[in-house]
Every structure is written in structure tokens, then in C-alpha cells.
Image (tube, grey):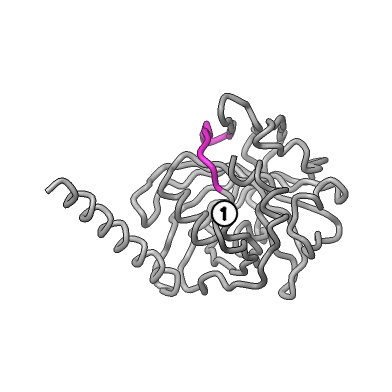
Amino acid sequence: MGWEPAIRTAGRALGADLRRLLALGDPRQSLYRDAHYFSATVEIDPARMRQWLPAGMQLSEPARADLFTAWFPDNNFESPGYHEAGLFVHVKTVQGTGIHCPWMILDDDVALIIGRELLGYPKKLGEVDWTLTDIEIHAQATRRGHKLLSMGGWLGEVIPDPPPILARPHRNVVGLAGLFPAWLVAFTPRESVIEVRRIEDFTLKLDGSERDPIDQMGIGRVIEARLHRVDLLGGWLPPIPVRPLTPLFTMTHLRPRIL
């Protein structure tokens, strides 16, 4: 009958989602292998950034963020080679400095659903052009015809004791529509460092658009740029609800998270 293929497809999708959830608790399971994060740590204007944070969330001191593009050549949900661009804002948590993600785009719908629905990354479909050679790296993120950011530079020395890129306490927001309120959730991914290199002669051009207003988030001077190569591992707890957010959050944060 006509509905049987749809049922089979839904069943396979449900089984895959369950396997991914179980993998979070399996320390033997690597979720991403050789993930590349081209990241720039930048100064943040606290007055401009606060409007994009959930009420009660506090910026770290001094105010910092990581603006990044990323390439994921191998993962466990059969979407090899997809790309992301996003912003990790450094925030205060009881576990020390953590990160909150107010904006992210990517070019794979499966990764979008998993990251947004399960982990609260505000992922939207966009385009990320990525070029990496033995000596240089360049990336550009666009969405709906608008160039949002471009970054590039030369691969420099290996950093012997680098900071983590993802293995920090996360405070993300899950759920923005429907009858139920959005929730602030907490989780901490695990990563195993393969190599981190400093980026020399780094260049950054930040634009933004009405629907992706990253140029309005107070991003300032670049402090340091790096290329992280890491394996992202299982063995961490799924997101834990911290507190509900008011409907005001949904209305004021609609553009960078959904539109």
C-alpha cells in the first residue's frame, strides 16, 4: 500500500535516533572523527551581547566568544563531509567557564535535526565553503543569498597545551515553538585532541543579515585564531533541563534561531 514506504522510513529514522542517543552514554563510541574547527577567539561587547542571552545567564569576565567554521569528514550518522558556522559565547556556570550558542548554520539536514532537537544548538540550513591545504585555510558562510562571514589564514605552529573547543559546559536552549516553554539545558561533550595549530595572518570579515544578525552581537577584536582537530566522544550525559524560559525569550530571539 502507499503508506508502507513511509512507515518503513519512519521506523528506520526512529531506530537511528535511538542508536545515537545510546551512543552518548557509550565511552567506546566516537560520534565524530577528526572534526575540524577553524575558530577565532574574539572580544565581546557585553552591552550588545546580553540581549541575545537567556535571562539570568552571565558572560564570562573578560567577555569572550569563539566564532568558528567547521568541517566534519566522518561521523556516526552517515552525513560525511558536512560543514557548520557558529558562535560560542563564553558564559559563567557552576562548573566554570562554559559556552552558549546563540547562532549556527550548517549544510546538512540530518545534523540539523539532531543538533537542534536533542542538544539545543540553533541550527539553520545555510552554505559554508571550506578550503584547507597543507599551508592555508579559508572558509565562507552564506545564507539566503547573504554573505555572513569569511575567515582565512596560514597554518602556524602546533599548540602543545590548547584550550578545548567543544569539551566545555554547554548551556543551550531546547524548544522554541508550540504549547510548551523553551528550556535551558546543560551538558558537557567530550573531545580527544588530535592536533591544534595556531593560525597566522588571520583575516575576518563579518557581515550579517536581517535574519542572521551576527554583526549586531558585539563581536570585536580577534585575540587568537586556531585550527582544532578533535574526535568527539561518547560517554557524556544527555542534556539535563535546568529551568524553563518565558515566552518573551521566544519572541525576542526568533530571528537568529529560527527564521
Helix, strand or loop under label 1: loop
Check disc 1 and report the residue beneath it: 177
Determine whether, in the image, residue 114 is placed left or right of residue 227.
left
Q: Position of residue 115 (x, y in %)?
A: 50, 55
Asked whether 190 falls inside the magenta stretch, the response is no
Residue at the farthest top position: 145
Determine whether, in the image, residue 4 is placed left or right of residue 48.
left
Q: Position of residue 193 (x, y in %)?
A: 55, 60
Please determine whether, in this image, residue 119 is positioned above or below residue 66. below
Please determine whether, in this image, residue 221 is positioned above or below residue 243. above
Q: Position of residue 253 (x, y in %)?
A: 69, 48
Q: Which residues are magenta?
A: 123-138
Q: Kindly identify the residue that appears in the image at 67 percent across and 58 percent down.
A: 162
Q: Position of residue 37 (x, y in %)?
A: 57, 47
Pick the front one: 250 or 190: 250
Pick the front one: 159 or 227: 227
Residue at the farthest left position: 1
Pick the front one: 220 or 199: 220
Q: State which quadrant residue 154 falls in.
A: top right
| Quarter of the figure with the C terminus | top right
Please determine whether, in this image, residue 142 is positioned above or below residue 165. above
